[in-house]
């Protein structure tokens, strides 16, 4: 990454962190994904359970492998064999001590914007786990909340649809979101988290790198 991009991200992260803290979010600024992983590992107590939703950023960080290596108790839907078991494990993850996730977009005034398919990710962000560890690249800070929502719907969601290999939705056929209501649709819940009721329950790891969709 160019030096001037990093400098800009650094300044913007300092500004954004104050806005996020006013909304009761904890903020950890990280130079890169590796630093985010190490800081998350030291935040998570060894004797606690950890659940997670689908997140490329979390996957790429290697955090889940590192937790397995130190024998953390993980609630892992990827280890299941049937759809029924997968849903049971996803429900269990909603009561984990910690939940790992990423955020689709953050507005410049510090609101979290997420579009979810099943809804387990935004459910855990909203209520359940005692602590949420959320990784997000500074590239995902888009502007006001309407602009952020627009970017997430027009850009992130269609990219996710392609990543997941959907077949029939407008974003697959034409490349752009068609605000579909099809059975394959992955944009079923749109959630804006304005504030955390419990101070520091949601820890936002602001990463000064271009990562994620
Ligand atoms: S076309 Fe449907 S699945 Fe694709 S991004 Fe839009 S709402 Fe989501």
Image: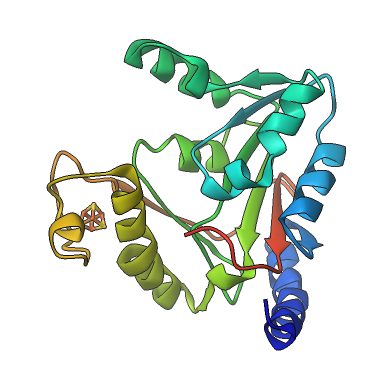
27 horizontally vs 149: left or right: right
User: Which is nearer the eye, 188 or 177?
Assistant: 177
* Residue 197 visible from this viewpoint: no
Q: Please give the name of the residue rendered at 45% of the width and 72% of the height, measured from the top-left corner.
A: 148
* Residue 122 visible from this viewpoint: yes
Q: Please give the name of the residue rendered at 70% of the width and 26% of the height, measured from the top-left corner.
A: 97
| Residue 182 coordinates in the image, percent (x, y) | 13, 45
130 horizontally vs 123: left or right: right
User: Which is nearer the eye, 54 or 96?
Assistant: 54
Q: Is residue 208 above or below residue 164?
A: below
Q: Farthest residue to the front: give it.
A: 1
User: Which is nearer the eye, 165 or 88?
Assistant: 165
Q: Is residue 211 above or below residue 108?
A: above
The N terminus appears in which quarter of the rendering? Answer: bottom right
Q: Quadrant of ligand 1?
A: bottom left
- Residue 65 image-quadrant placement: top right
């Amino acid at each position: 990454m160019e030096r001037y991009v990093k400098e800009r991200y650094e300044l913007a992260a300092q500004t954004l962190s104050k806005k996020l803290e006013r909304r009761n979010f904890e903020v950890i600024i990280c130079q890169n994904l590796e630093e985010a992983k190490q800081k998350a590992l030291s935040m998570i107590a060894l004797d606690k359970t950890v659940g997670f939703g689908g997140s490329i950023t979390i996957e790429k960080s290697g955090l889940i492998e590192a937790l397995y290596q130190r024998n953390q108790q993980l609630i892992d839907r990827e280890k299941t064999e049937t759809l029924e078991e997968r849903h049971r494990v996803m429900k269990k993850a909603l009561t984990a001590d910690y939940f790992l996730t990423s955020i689709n977009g953050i507005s410049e005034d510090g609101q979290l914007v997420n579009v979810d398919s099943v809804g387990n990710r935004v459910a855990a962000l909203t209520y359940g786990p005692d602590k949420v560890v959320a990784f997000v690249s500074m590239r995902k800070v888009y502007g006001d909340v309407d602009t952020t929502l627009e970017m997430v719907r027009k850009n992130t969601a269609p990219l996710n649809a392609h990543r997941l290999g959907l077949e029939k939705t407008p974003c697959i056929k034409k490349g752009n979101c068609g605000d579909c209501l099809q059975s394959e649709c992955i944009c079923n819940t749109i959630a804006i988290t304005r504030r955390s009721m419990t101070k520091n329950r949601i820890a936002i790891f602001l990463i000064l790198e271009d990562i994620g969709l």
